[in-house]
Image (tube, rainbow, N blue to C red):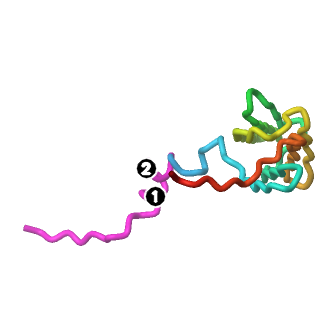
């Protein structure tokens, strides 16, 4: 019987190429979900999405039956040719977020502004339909 000394620490290559950790890592994910801030004001809702690196042309905003959908797709390619080699780099990222709008929103009054990596949506509330607090007694 021989004793084999085995390290409890995996080698760097095992750690890097372990299929459970390497191929499922965030490095290979092409879809991501941007962070969102939502604030309610007296006459509107404000929604902010952090989507750095996008251009205005990359962003799509739709409203359909009370659901606000914000999505985007960004592709870039860079090719460098030299006498001895050709290097081509490309990247792709996309996202999609959907929000169910409250019944008191006016879907025709939605404005969007994209600046410094932040998409800010302003969604107006319907006028005259303010919900009031009501105390309901149990019988």
Q: From the viewer's perspective, is residue 65 above or below residue 57? A: above
Between 54 and 22, the one lying in front of the other is: 54
Query: What residue is at 76 percent from the left and 27 percent from the top?
Result: 64
Q: Residues within 10 Å of mark 1 (few under 14, many from 20)?
A: few
Between 27 and 60, the one lying in front of the other is: 60
Q: Is residue 30 magenta?
A: no
Mark 1 highlights which residue?
13
Circle 2 SS class? loop
Q: Earlier in the sequence, mark 2 or mark 1?
A: 1
The percent position of residue 116, horizontal first and vertical second, equals 90, 55
Q: From the viewer's perspective, is residue 62 above or below residue 120? A: above
Identify the mark at residue 20; answer none if there is no mark.
2
Q: Going by the image, does 95 lie left or right of 16?
A: right
The count of marks equals 2
Q: Quadrant of the N terminus?
A: bottom left
Between 102 and 138, the one lying in front of the other is: 138
Q: Is residue 9 magenta?
A: yes
Which residue range is magenta in the image?
Answer: 1-23
Which secondary structure is most common in the magenta stretch?
Answer: loop
Q: Residues within 10 Å of mark 2 (few under 14, many from 20)?
A: few
Identify the mark at residue 120; answer none if there is no mark.
none
Residue 55 visible? The answer is no
As drawn, the residue found furthest toward the left would be 1
Q: CA distance from mark 2 to mark 1?
A: 13 Å
Circle 1 SS class? helix
Q: Going by the image, does 16 lie left or right of 69?
A: left
């Amino acid at each position: 019987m021989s004793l084999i000394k085995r390290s409890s620490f995996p080698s760097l290559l095992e750690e890097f190429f372990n299929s459970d950790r390497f191929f499922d890592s965030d490095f290979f994910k092409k879809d991501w979900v941007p962070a969102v801030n939502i604030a309610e004001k007296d006459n509107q809702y404000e929604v902010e999405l952090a989507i750095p690196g996008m251009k205005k042309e990359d962003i799509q905003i739709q409203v359909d039956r009370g659901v606000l959908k914000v999505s985007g797709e960004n592709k870039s390619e860079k090719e460098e040719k030299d006498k001895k080699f050709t290097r081509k780099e490309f990247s792709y990222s996309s996202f999609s977020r959907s929000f169910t709008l409250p019944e008191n929103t006016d879907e025709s009054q939605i404005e969007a502004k994209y600046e410094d990596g932040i998409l800010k949506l302003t969604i107006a509330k319907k006028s005259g339909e303010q919900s009031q607090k009501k105390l309901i007694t149990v019988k």
